[in-house]
Amino acid sequence: MSSATAPAPRSRTKSEFVDSTDLLGDPVALRARAQQDGYLFFRQRLPKDEVLAMRAEMLAIVEKYGWRQKGQDALGGLIDYDAINSISEEQMHRTDVGVTADAYHDVQKLERFHRLPHHPRLLEIYRALFGREVLVHPRHIARMITPHTCMVPTPPHQDFPYIQGSTQTWTCWFPVGDCARSEGGLTVLRGSHVHGYLPVQPAKGAGGFAVPLCPTETDWVEGDYRTGDVLTFPSHTIHKALRSQFKDRIRLSMDVRYQAADELVDHSSLNPHCTLKWDEIYANWQSDELKYYWKKMPLKMSPWDDGYLKAARRIC
């Protein structure tokens, strides 16, 4: 038997998010931090009452389908484990967001769900970053991560292969309610954006692909999110979801994307994140203000490239 000792397991570095709120008045410094870290974090950026109003509407839909535990107030996210797991894996995988397609369609029809991404306190971030007119992608995503046995945390990935268009499209991720890291919040690999697009391989979890990580890539940044906190990063930053430690609750969050309006955008980013048509989504809205707003902008469209989501080997 060899006397050589096995190498010690590689540790995972954990850093806390750095709040960039104080840089909003200094766009040069804000852009420098974004370029260095590949993410920006803002504590309590969105008004708590508006986020909680969104939470109540989303949970009312969860309640409608019989998945919430009884006896909670409108903001309680405790889930009936047996009820959610009575849904087949096939039904759950139609959306990969944590609930069935019917429930997800109900969320997509909520006017507040499409209005919140246009909040002035979010637009202020991207106007400072881009220095010109901002396009809010109308394709918003809700993540409603339930304790269904088929749910797998989103693997390490970049957003660019899924949205394409401008490489300077930024994802804005925020929890709809408090979200401790033990509940499965989002974490980013600091500085990973500098490598540009990276090859992918098939993986379980939302999206179906992951970026294979090199041994040196361990500088993950994470934290406990409070209602109103906002995390944002460009489309080449590697990020993933932490695993929830609970089997009795739902994790609600939103993915929203922003870019400079004069840069390339793929047509898919202008479609709903579901099989509904915009007219179906708009059917019961009280206001016409945000209906088809992007059609008033002189956008430059780019072709879709299937090659980005073909499995390839990454050389470290």
Image: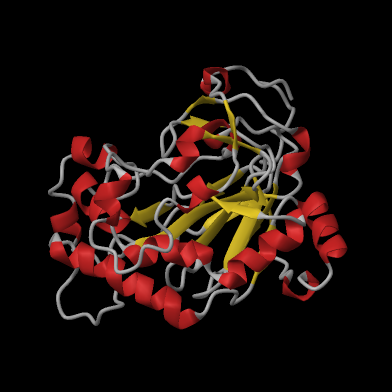
Viewport quadrant of the C terminus: top right
Q: How is the image coloured?
A: secondary structure
**Is residue 216 or residue 234 the one in the foreground?**
234
Position of residue 185 measured from the top left corner of the image (x, y, whole percent): 50, 59
From what the image shows, is residue 126 above or below residue 208? below
Q: Which one is in front, 52 or 16?
A: 52
Relative horizontal placement of residue 213, taking residue 52 as reference (left or right): right
Give the residue at x 22% y 63%: 62
Q: Where the N terminus falls, by quadrant? A: top right
Q: From the top left corner, tell me how far across and down residue 217 is, in percent.
A: 72, 40
Q: Nearer the viewer, residue 95 or 115?
A: 115
Where 83 sits versus 116, above or below? Answer: above
Image location of residue 122, percent across then percent down: 60, 66
Identity of the residue drawn at 73% across and 55% down? 132
Number of numbered markers: 0
What residue sits 41% from the left and 60% below the top?
Answer: 114
Work out whether residue 77 can be spotted: no
Q: Does residue 16 appear to the left or right of 26 in the view shown?
A: left
Name the spot of residue 157 as percent of width and height, x first.
57, 38
Residue 121 in view: yes
| Residue occupying image coordinates x 42% and y 50% | 292
